[in-house]
Amino acid sequence: MSAQTSNQYDAIVVGGGHNGLVCAAYLAAAGLKVTVLERRSVVGGAAITEEFHPGFRNSVASYAVSLLNPKIIRDLELPAHGLRIVERRLANFLPTADGRYLITGGGRTREEVARFSARDAARLGDYGERLESIADVLRDLVLTTPPNALEGSWRTALPELVRAARVAGRLRRLDMGQRRELLALFATSAGDYLDNWFESEPIKALYGFDSIVGNYASPYTPGSAYVLLHMVFGEVNGKRGAWGHAIGGMGAITQAMARAAAARGVVIRVASPVREVLVEGDRAVGVVTESGETLRAAAVISNLNPRLLYLNMFAPSALPPEFREHMSHWRCGSGTFRMNVALHELPDFTCLPGRRLADHHTAGIILAPTLAYMEQAYFDARTFGWSRQPIVELVIPSTLDDTLAPSGQHVASLFCQHVAPQLPNGESWDQHREKVADLMIETVNAHAPNFKAAVLARQIMSPLDLERTFGLTGGDIFHGALSLDQLFSARPMLGYGNYRGPLQGLYMCGSGTHPGGGVTGAPGHNAAREVLRDFRHGRLRRVA
Ligand SMILES: Cc1cc2nc3c(=O)[nH]c(=O)nc-3n(C[C@H](O)[C@H](O)[C@H](O)COP(=O)(O)OP(=O)(O)OC[C@H]3O[C@@H](n4cnc5c(N)ncnc54)[C@H](O)[C@@H]3O)c2cc1C
């Protein structure tokens, strides 16, 4: 094979995050010659596992499974490639402001909520059903391509009209009450929405936490109620709304995906950062790597945050000016600070004492007792750069997975919010990361006084670390805010919501496209379908 043909592909996927791997696997399964070029020495993007202290391994960024799509698990045969997902024994454990605690999951939610409010306990069923029935309809849209707002001839408009009609058809399945609820979820704040449903603070805080995950906003910010819905889409081992853990951490998911892709013939190249997308006329025709190597392909598919792609990998003149301008305003910055700690013993919570492994240690432990606390955390972060009383979710995956830490010892993930994506007064996160990490540990210690002394080692990811390590612009965990103006057909921009970029042959398959962030695999799956459609319809020609 000559050097020229060996560097020619039907499709090049830029970035080996989980969506890039999924996209590549589907394309190769259809017979295309595909390569994935990953900047780092490991594939998986924000879903990887690393040893951060001798004998202690953990997911570095993303840490819990729920949104990973069952169809993709099946199609890629991920269990056969080594993936095993286990469920938590309890869903959540939330210490309250008055020294008590709320537990959910494990069949105990109703009785536990009733300890705070009999009225709230009685309303839980209706709340769950209402959200679930709407999520059901929207769940169907996860694997569909949004209708694209297109100018042009009837030939281009017709398929989009058909798609729009299909979406409208699905929404028509909602009764009037559900439609009103959907409007409320899109337009109101999670805080207002939950205040309308419940009266006791702990259950509102527990649900409200979902609305600020990856969302740098107060739970009272209009539009934040939608994120409640985004989180309900998930399921684990067929159980809707459940959260689980991949044995071996999130890297086990992406390693299984990489094996599935390789088994279908994908050539995966790590330590191969792409410097620019090669453009000829109005077509993307390949890429140039940092080392100066040129690879050509009929389709160039980006797994990157849209802002990173369009502002860094093209000469400004290669893109329509209004498109580039729009991308420069793409809102990124989820206000997330992430840590791992190695622990020589489990945290002993004042409100539920005990250092021996108990069900609550397996839960998502939420340290944010009220919606008002979360709102204050946001205001603090806006003013000072981080909240003086931050929001921390503590998850101890080694309670469910004995491959992560030496026997009797543990690893914990701290998923912390709110911190400012960019600090005030131009200060750098490098100056403050250790201090803020101390604050996060003190925050846990206030609830479990043996925690600080139990920490053997820690790994810190400030927003800047997330950007530098993973290419997550502004540290945004979802490749861009999940707000109404950046969702569905408008992700990443109205007119480009169907995975196609502004140049022929250019596609997007990352979390910056529908249905957004989370380890879902859905953007990769949907993008592959659109690329294959263009090959089928002659808009792309096989070169390999
Ligand atoms: C701290 C944190 C916690 C999270 N928690 C959860 C969670 O618990 N559950 C959940 O479902 N989701 C979670 N998420 C969100 C989820 O991890 C992401 O939305 C998802 O992993 C993004 O996948 P992706 O494939 O779209 O992009 P990415 O994973 O960002 O992959 C993009 C890839 O492109 C590569 N790349 C960048 N530049 C170049 C270049 N120039 N050349 C070649 N390659 C390049 C990157 O190295 C990376 O591998 C979390 C994210 C973070 C950061």
Image: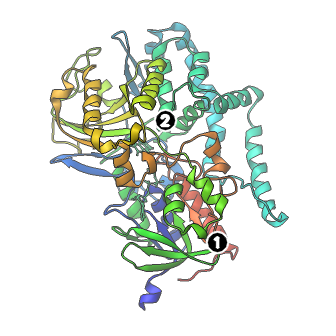
Q: What residue type is labelled 1?
A: Gln
The residue lying furthest to the front in this view is 425
Whether residue 237 is visible, yes or no, is yes
Separation of residues labelled 1 and 2 (CA atoms) = 35 Å
Does 315 appear above or below 227? Answer: below
Query: Which image quarter: residue 189?
Result: top right
Task: Name the residue at 45% across, 16% down.
Answer: 202
Does 428 appear above or below 242? Answer: below
Q: Which amino acid does label 2 sit on?
A: Tyr
Task: Name the residue at 62% across, 75% down.
Answer: 283
Relative image position of residue 132 (x, y in whole percent): 60, 31
- Lateral position of residue 81 relative to residue 74, left or right: left
Residue wearing tag 1: 504
Q: Which quadrant, please, contains the N terminus? A: bottom left
Relative image position of residue 373 (x, y in whole percent): 43, 20
Residue wearing tag 2: 216
